[in-house]
Image (cartoon, rainbow, N blue to C red):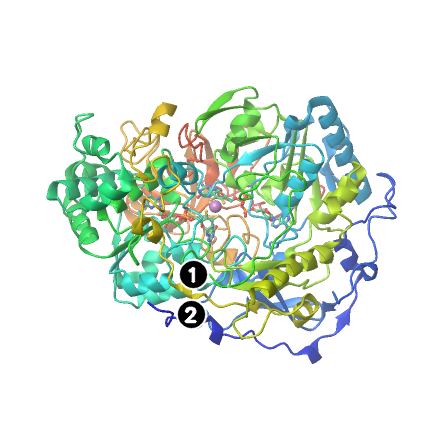
């Protein structure tokens, strides 16, 4: 494929902006996005000097558009937002002619709408403010009291000083896991880490919830994280693959967002795949949006939840006995196959992992398993693996086993063959362009190197999903990837840009552990469940109330987007940067925190570094022009577009390794794909061994003596990003009986006397929630589905096992580690019961402010 397959992006144009319809307004609201710069701040009681006139700092226009279009960006893509009379009236993709993405249309609601529920002022929980003994027990059930911004800064800075001086940095948990908003400057989590890092250290979080298991096992197997790497380019997949397997992924939904900002290319390629006539196979327990999208153009294989490893073993065994696998690839590129083979053949444990054995566990017929072995081996096959199957108990095994299966197919490193673990996420496979990378705010002087997710400059770090365990069990030691970690004793928790009362497993266990620290501080735009569980909250500006910059396309680097302020901020809301700048000042390191720079100074600096690199390299944009200087870029109010390079279009993952494994070895101890890992063998873990294998999960549909009846799927929502966007009109499209929907198979609904639209109580030994029934064969008998991300809404947070009135799946999920190796979360391993709810329905208060607010 030689560069003829250029993407269509160059033909798209940013809708032209009618500058005559723009009128300028310099609002006082703008001031709140300008950080305090040195000097005048003399103490926590001084209210006169937290802001500085923007005109003194910037030399270009940051005027607000009152009537006209403003370009910005969000996780869901580059946006064109139309404003009338200073209010948002429309929001759409900045580029025309792309696949529809409904998340892009609701920007107005995020600022102000039916469910928006903004935090309007700094607030403190009443009994905390009054320093009542044992006030922690009232978290989530107390009244709130408004305080002035200056008072809030004083309370927080004094408290941080107290904890630091009496207990040291390891008493502050700043892991603050979360998806925050797009933007290289207003990066909530990094801004918090910068504040805690420059202030003397903190306890951080290792890894993430997305790929907690895979990102720890993959370096042992392949020498890289693998889950966050560029994939063989989509044009090559479309040209060369004969079979595309979408294994436990739902790209039609999950490609609606990206970590930086969505370039929307994945959905375009999926459309091309659908129309390609290739054999498409979806392996998923549910008839996901993707299965529905491909409809008759794909084969849907329903697997029993949590049993993919068994299915893979059945395919592998079939390949062995039919002698249809690539022995040369195994010999040349992998390590330790023979030992694994003994396990498959039952020589180590007396259990032959043949198609019959696999079928009994995974529910896929023996014939189908044998057919898959044949189809995969005989055709150029690309396996696109999603991540849900590693967000499960023993999640390390699934991706490891998929790599072994791909090795036996023998097409790794060939165009259109092998596996890819990022096609469903952030548009992996969208060819990389020549754009220079725009940097962002950093954690400050301690340079940690590597990805923000993986090293946060913290003093001690715990695997992110061990947060409840850490809070509940100070001093406990756990094993982690060959090391031991001793939990510190946490006295203060600081969260900015995440929502643990929605994202973390076993909410009731978290609720009880959360009562231990003396102080909990949360920054958010909205009264989220986590904000309601705090002691002190700061009201934060939405991304549409401040200026920023982001690229879109985590792998393509396709655009550089100005994120221009769209509307004046809510009166008392401030950016995270402003709050942390003022806190740093109050703690004596304001100058170090801001380096004397305001919002626009940073944005200009990030842009200029990229601009200079582009100039040096002679980069030309898609329209043939060089990159504009910053002033031109900013006032032009539109994204820059870059074109894929020939190398980007022709990229084949692992092509170099395939060409010469000696010259281009992998970063594993053997330099080859480790089917057997001596490193892991030496760790001697009970739940992750030297080669991938089937372990029975703690709870699953086929287990003996099931503690509850139904397997719970809790995948990612179509019309939200986790909990984000739940408070928009999109909710009207999915809520049932004003609750989060639960999908129930018709046979199960009949047996439980549940009708479509009924209120259902979903429960197990960990908790109980209300949900609205959708009776549908989207799920099999014995399986139910509730999307993660519904806002937790406890009936009475001070009561044990309180009912969640809105339907948050994590009230029901298990807070156990995937294994001693990765300690990832096991969110998608859980059994639940269902029954028709017959009581008087309690009011859903998820989107209402708490008492006093
Ligand atoms: N059962 C189950 N649970 C899961 C999963 C699952 O599959 N099943 N998936 C897991 C995964 S992969 C993930 S990534 C997590 C996601 O968990 P989170 O990342 O915590 O989810 P979000 O809803 O994106 O939370 C972001 C929060 O930041 C706030 N925010 C946005 N912008 C800003 C800002 O500029 N400043 C501040 N201060 N706040 C801001 C938003 O309002 C929101 O409250 O959930 C995990 N939980
Ligand atoms: N619209 C939208 N897009 C998102 C997100 C979002 O919240 N909303 N979140 C983003 C984030 S942070 C992440 S980490 C990714 C998550 O990406 P993934 O982890 O891949 O997404 P999930 O939705 O959890 O699961 C994908 C599919 O796996 C299926 N599945 C569940 N259990 C099993 C099983 O045991 N076996 C098999 N074979 N399949 C199973 C589900 O039914 C679902 O269709 O998505 C990203 N994209
Ligand atoms: Mo994630």
> Which residue in the rendered view is the most extreme toward the left?
322
User: What crowding class fits label 1: few (fewer than 14 Cα within 10 Å), some (14-19), or many (20 or more)?
Assistant: many
Left or right: where does residue 734 sit relative to residue 30? left
Residue 634 % position (x, y): 67, 67
Q: Quadrant of residue 619?
A: bottom right
Q: Quadrant of the N terminus?
A: bottom left
Q: Please, what secondary structure does the residue beneath circle 2 have?
A: loop
Question: Percent x, y for residue 633?
Answer: 65, 68
| Residue at image point 72% right, 27% down | 164
The one nearer the camera, 606 or 216, is 606
On the image, the x and y values in percent for residue 338 come to: 21, 33
Q: Is residue 277 left or right of residue 320?
A: right
Q: Which residue is mark 2?
A: 7
Helix or strand or loop: what does disc 1 sit on? loop
Label 2 neighbour load within 10 Å: few <14, some 14-19, many 20+: some
Residue shown at 32%/57% (left/top)? 291
Residue 423 figure quarter: bottom left
User: In this figure, what is the number of numbered marks?
Assistant: 2
Cβ at disc 2 under 8 Å from ligand 2:
no
Point out the quarter of the image occupied by ligand 1.
Answer: top right
Q: Relative to the observer, which residue lies in front, 24 or 205? A: 205
Q: Against 774, is 559 above or below?
A: below
Disc 1 + disc 2, Cβ < 8 Å: yes
Q: Quadrant of the C terminus?
A: top right
- In-front residue for pair 422/773: 422
What residue occupies the far top of the structure in this picture?
Answer: 475
Q: Distance of mark 1 from mark 2, alpha carbons?
A: 9 Å
According to the image, label 1 marks what residue? 430
User: In the rendered image, is residue 395 in sight?
Assistant: no
Q: Residue at x 37, y 42 (%)?
A: 666
* Residue 436, x across and y down, in percent: 56, 60
Lower sequence index among marks 1 and 2: 2
């Amino acid at each position: 494929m030689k560069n003829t397959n250029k993407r269509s992006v160059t033909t798209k144009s940013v809708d032209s902006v009618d500058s005559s319809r723009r009128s300028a307004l310099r609002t006082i609201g703008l001031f709140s996005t300008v950080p305090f710069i040195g000097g005048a701040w003399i103490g926590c009681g001084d209210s006169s000097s937290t802001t500085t006139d923007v005109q003194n700092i910037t030399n270009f226009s940051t005027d607000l558009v009152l009537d006209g279009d403003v370009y910005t960006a969000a996780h869901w893509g580059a946006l064109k937002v139309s404003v009338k009379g200073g209010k948002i009236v429309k929001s759409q993709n900045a580029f025309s002619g792309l696949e529809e993405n409904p998340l892009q249309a609701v920007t107005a609601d995020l600022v102000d709408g039916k469910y928006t529920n903004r935090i309007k002022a700094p607030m403190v929980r009443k009994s905390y403010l009054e320093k009542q003994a044992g006030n922690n027990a009232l978290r989530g059930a107390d009244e709130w009291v408004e305080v002035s911004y200056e008072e809030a800064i004083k309370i927080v800075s004094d408290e941080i000083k107290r904890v630091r001086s009496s207990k040291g940095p390891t008493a502050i948990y700043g892991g603050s896991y979360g998806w925050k908003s797009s933007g290289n400057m207003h990066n909530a989590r990094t801004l918090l880490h910068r504040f805690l890092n420059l202030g003397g250290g903190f306890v951080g979080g290792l890894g993430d919830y997305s790929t907690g298991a895979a990102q720890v096992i993959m370096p042992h197997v392949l020498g890289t994280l693998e889950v966050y790497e560029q994939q063989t380019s989509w044009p090559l997949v479309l040209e060369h693959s004969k079979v595309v397997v979408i294994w436990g992924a739902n790209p039609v939904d999950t490609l609606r967002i990206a970590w930086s900002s969505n370039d929307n290319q994945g959905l375009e390629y999926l459309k091309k795949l659908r129309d390609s006539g290739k054999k498409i196979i979806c392996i998923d327990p549910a008839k996901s949006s993707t299965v529905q999208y491909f409809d008759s153009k794909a084969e849907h294989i329903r697997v029993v939840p949590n049993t993919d490893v068994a299915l893979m073993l059945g395919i592998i065994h079939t390949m062995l006995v039919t002698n249809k696998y690539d022995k040369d690839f195994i010999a040349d590129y992998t390590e330790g196959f023979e030992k694994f083979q003994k396990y498959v053949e039952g020589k180590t444990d007396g259990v032959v992992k043949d198609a019959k054995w696999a079928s009994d566990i995974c529910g896929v017929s023996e014939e189908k398993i044998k057919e898959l072995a044949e189809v995969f081996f005989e055709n150029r096959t690309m396996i696109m693996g999603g991540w849900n199957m590693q967000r499960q108990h023993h999640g390390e095994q699934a991706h490891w086993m998929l790599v072994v299966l791909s090795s036996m197919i023998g097409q790794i490193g060939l165009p259109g063959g092998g596996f890819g673990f990022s096609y469903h996420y952030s548009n992996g496979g969208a060819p990389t362009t020549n754009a220079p990378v725009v940097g962002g705010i950093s954690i400050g002087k301690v340079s940690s190197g590597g990805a923000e997710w993986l090293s946060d400059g913290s003093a001690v770090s715990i695997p992110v999903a061990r947060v409840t365990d850490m809070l509940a069990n100070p001093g406990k030691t756990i094993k982690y990837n060959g090391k031991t970690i001793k939990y510190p004793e946490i006295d203060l928790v600081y969260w900015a840009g995440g929502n643990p009362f929605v994202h973390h497993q076993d909410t009731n266990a978290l609720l009880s552990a959360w009562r231990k620290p003396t102080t909990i501080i949360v920054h958010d735009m909205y009264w989220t469940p986590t904000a309601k569980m705090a002691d002190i909250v700061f009201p934060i500006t939405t991304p549409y109330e401040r200026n920023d910059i982001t690229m879109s396309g985590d792998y393509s680097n396709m655009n550089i987007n100005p994120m221009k302020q769209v509307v004046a901020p809510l009166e008392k809301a401030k950016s995270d940067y402003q709050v942390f700048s003022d806190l740093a000042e109050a703690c004596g390191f304001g100058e170090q925190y801001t380096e004397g720079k305001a919002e626009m100074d940073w944005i200009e600096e990030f842009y200029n570094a990229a601009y200079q690199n582009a100039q040096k390299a002679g980069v030309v944009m898609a329209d043939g022009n060089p990159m504009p200087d910053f002033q031109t870029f900013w006032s032009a109010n539109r994204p820059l577009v870059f074109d894929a390079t020939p190398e980007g279009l022709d990229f084949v993952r692992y092509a170099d390794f395939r060409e010469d494994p000696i010259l281009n070895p992998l970063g594993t101890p053997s330099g080859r794909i480790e089917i057997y890992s001596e490193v892991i063998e030496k760790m001697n873990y009970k739940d992750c061994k030297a080669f991938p294998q089937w372990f029975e999960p703690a709870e699953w549909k086929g287990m003996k003596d099931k503690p509850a009846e139904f397997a719970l799927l809790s995948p990612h929502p179509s019309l939200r990003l986790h909990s984000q966007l739940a408070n928009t009109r999109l909710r009207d499209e999915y809520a049932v009986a004003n609750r989060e929907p639960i999908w129930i198979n018709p046979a199960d609904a009949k047996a439980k006397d549940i009708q479509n639209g009924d209120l259902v109580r979903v429960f197990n030994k960990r908790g109980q929630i209300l949900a609205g029934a959708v009776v549908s064969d989207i799920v099999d008998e014995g399986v139910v589905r509730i999307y993660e991300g519904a806002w937790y809404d406890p009936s009475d947070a001070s009561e044990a096992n309180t009912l969640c009135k809105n339907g948050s799946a994590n009230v029901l999920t298990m807070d156990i580690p995937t294994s001693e190796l990765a300690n990832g979360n096991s969110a998608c391993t859980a059994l639940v019961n269902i029954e028709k709810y017959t009581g008087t329905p309690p009011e859903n208060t998820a989107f209402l402010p708490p008492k006093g607010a």
